[in-house]
Image (cartoon, rainbow, N blue to C red):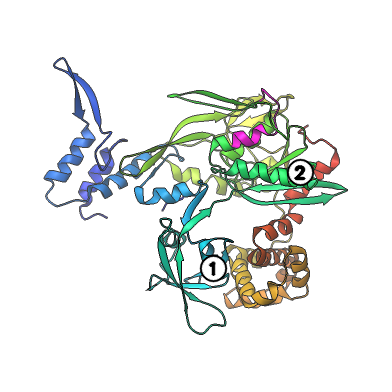
Amino acid sequence: MKKYIFPTLTVIGVALGIIIGGALSQKVNAQRIVFQNGQLQWELSKVDRLLQLMETAYVDELNIDSITDEAMTDLVKKLDPHSAYIPKEDLEMVNSELSGSFSGIGVQFTIQQDTVRIVAVIAGGPCAGVGVLAGDKLIAVDDSAFVGKKLNNEKVMKTLRGEKGTQVKLGILRAGVKEPLSFTVTRGDIPVTSVDAKFIIERQGKKIGFVRVNKFGETTYKEFITALAELNAQGATSFIVDLRENSGGYMDQAIKMANEFLKGGEMIVYSEGRAYPRYEAKANGGGRFKNVPLVVLIDNFSASASEIFAGAMQDNDRATIVGRRSFGKGLVQQQMPFSDGSAVRLTVARYYTPSGRCIQKPYTLGDQDDYEKDLMERYEHGEFYSADSVHFSDTTVYRTKKGRIVHGGGGIMPDVFVGRDTTLNTPWYNICVNMAYTYQFAYKYTDEHRKELSKYTDWQSLEKYLKTKDIIREFVKFAEEKGVEPKEAEIQKSRPLMTRLLHAYIIRDVLGDEGFFPFFERDDEITKVAVEQLTQSDRTSAQ
């Protein structure tokens, strides 16, 4: 979940210290039923009484709604790291991340040098209809300046999104045009897609379908099965499902996806909690891809629903899991709304893979800081590079359908581990990448050469063109202007890696994800191992 004073600090301290779940700005759900004098009566809770006293008797006028929101947020932080309180003003944006669509103007943007720059205009969207173009700079919204250091992604999204049918006036700077342009855009439905890319990889006479899923939202299964069908129609006889950096989402979407690959009766996942009755999800036998060879890609950022899918494939010995150990989120959240428009996502159960393991990594109630440091600690311990550095908190032995040992208490361990390759990394390269200078340069280069680059409609021809240009030299000069000292030996060592990255970002800025992913995955180490797995035999499953 993304994390987006009051005059009287003493009062806030009291509120934060004693408010418990159920305290609302309207003070509903803060009552209890008691049996008194032979009758059932409603009795105000201690929390409700305090809020009432603060609102009516405190020496100064208070904003009870704001105090309550702060208190609720603080309270839920005392639970597990995945429970969260969502204030009313943030709920729509949070929900839109997993919904099938939201209402907005239809652009992809980046913020560079305190300015919003349009990276892409969604085809058929509101901005496309009025003439906004990729490369435009957004400098004003509704006749008010919209630039400066206070700009961030959250502010931009809140400003540009809005109710369908409402209008927003955009002030645009465009290369080659002296005066600012003005466009009035009527907000409309913008689809939220889950499948980043789908394409065919051809190796040794075989066609392998590659599908990358970025999250599990309302439309994920529909998009996924459509992608499989299209690739199958193009001749794909095996598949790679890429769940790297997929942080999860709706459990039912992962279950539907898994059902497509499993035989009837095979367990997909089960879940249970203290007040949450055991729920089992099993394959119904109607899957259309039960017999196709399959590889699933995961990494340290694959979590939740991604781990449900990967765990079901691994425990049923249905697919080979390739990559690095997943995040380790085995908790189930349920979103519960409050009458004031806010909501809480509360952990209500744990889920278990078919072998009976819960892959949730250890946590301490109320200690989110240590929990969030886990990935950094894994990195420092060398886990990103070597399977020998991986350790699990659960020592129980779990076995797959064929009897292979798998682990719980810390994510999904892949069947084939692929560590990070740092042979071409240098301090110069790392600084440039970590400071996002590669991304900034790619946008600048694309913007300055957009007319020429737009002639190329596929990544193969665009890559061929880019190879004729000395991109590295231009980038070295760009990075030096940013304060990165050019070191020739390091530049030459990292040249292949940096060239690939710069070409990939430029291709993305010109052609979008449909061009970026086929190009980038061609030389990706994890993808190459997955392809090797699928070309070794006609049927791939974990051995």
Picture residue at 73% right of the left edge, 69% below the top: 456
Decide: few, some or many residues near mark 1? Use Cα within 10 Å; few <14, some 14-19, many ≥20.
many
**Residue occupied by mark 1:** 118
Which residues make up the magenta segment? 254-266
Q: Is residue 131 left or right of residue 92?
A: right
Task: Quadrant for residue 155, please give it.
Answer: bottom left
Residue lying furthest bottom in this view? 178
Left/right of residue 78 with respect to residue 33 in the rendered view: right
Mark number, residue 232: 2
Q: How far is the residue under mark 1 from the one under mark 2?
A: 35 Å
Q: Is residue 418 visible?
A: no
Question: Of 390 and 328, which appears nearest the observer?
Answer: 328
Q: Is residue 431 above or below residue 402?
A: below
User: Residue 441's spot in the image, x, y percent?
Assistant: 62, 71
Task: Choose mark 1 or mark 2, whichever is in front.
Answer: 2
Q: Is residue 285 above or below residue 155?
A: above
**In the rendered image, the vertical position of residue 186 relative to residue 203, given as above or below:** below
**Residue placed furthest toward the right:** 205
Q: Nearer the viewer, residue 475 or 97?
A: 97
Give how far across and how far down residue 231 sits, in percent.
74, 46
Residue 129 appears at what percent x and percent y? 54, 66
